[in-house]
């Protein structure tokens, strides 16, 4: 990767939506896991909107979210989602399309 590509990758801002069900256990785990992943891999380059489907079910219906927790990666494109409490970090990192610092 050349310097211009590296700068472009590092400037990416990730727009994420986390659909949760109030303080339900898996929703809380997903919040915590997402916070750790954002801190470790996105280093301040993310905007996270949390949507509680118990308070705003119309947003979930509009996005066709039927299971919580669900993380929707709005940008960068392509738009994708990860369902579950985000314990599978490799799955989340792959969906975000960021390189793990542990890779060689």
Image (spheres, rainbow, N blue to C red):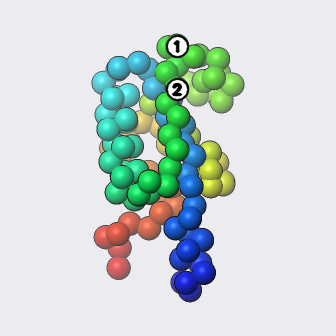
Residue pictured at 45% horizontal, 26% vertical: 20
Residue pictured at 64% horizontal, 28% vertical: 64
Residue pictured at 58% horizontal, 28% vertical: 65
Residue situated in front as seen by the camera: 89 or 22 = 22
Question: Horizontal placement of 77 versus 20: left or right?
Answer: right
User: Mark 2 highlights which residue?
Assistant: 51
Residue density around tag 1, few if under 14, some if 14–19, many if 20 or more, within 10 Å: few
Q: Examine the image and state in which quarter residue 31 appears.
A: top left
- Whether residue 88 can be seen here: yes
Give above or below for 82 relative to 44.
Answer: above
Q: Examine the image and state in which quarter residue 34 appears.
A: top left
Give percent across and percent down for residue 77.
66, 54
Q: Secondary structure at mark 1?
A: loop
User: Mark 1 highlights which residue?
Assistant: 55
Give percent across and percent down for residue 73.
57, 46
Give above or below for 22 relative to 35.
Answer: above
Question: Horizontal placement of 39 versus 64: left or right?
Answer: left
Residue situated in front as seen by the camera: 60 or 6 = 6
Q: Examine the image and state in which quarter residue 28 appears.
A: top left
């Amino acid at each position: 990767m050349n310097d211009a590509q590296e700068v472009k990758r590092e400037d990416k801002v990730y727009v994420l939506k986390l659909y949760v069900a109030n303080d339900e256990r898996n929703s809380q785990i997903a919040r915590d896991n997402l916070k750790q992943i954002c801190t470790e891999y996105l280093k301040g380059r993310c905007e996270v909107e949390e949507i509680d489907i118990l308070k705003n079910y119309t947003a979930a219906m509009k996005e066709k979210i039927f299971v919580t927790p669900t993380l929707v990666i709005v940008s960068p494109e392509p738009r994708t989602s990860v369902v579950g409490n985000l314990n599978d970090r490799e799955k989340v990192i792959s969906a975000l399309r960021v390189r793990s610092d542990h890779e060689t």
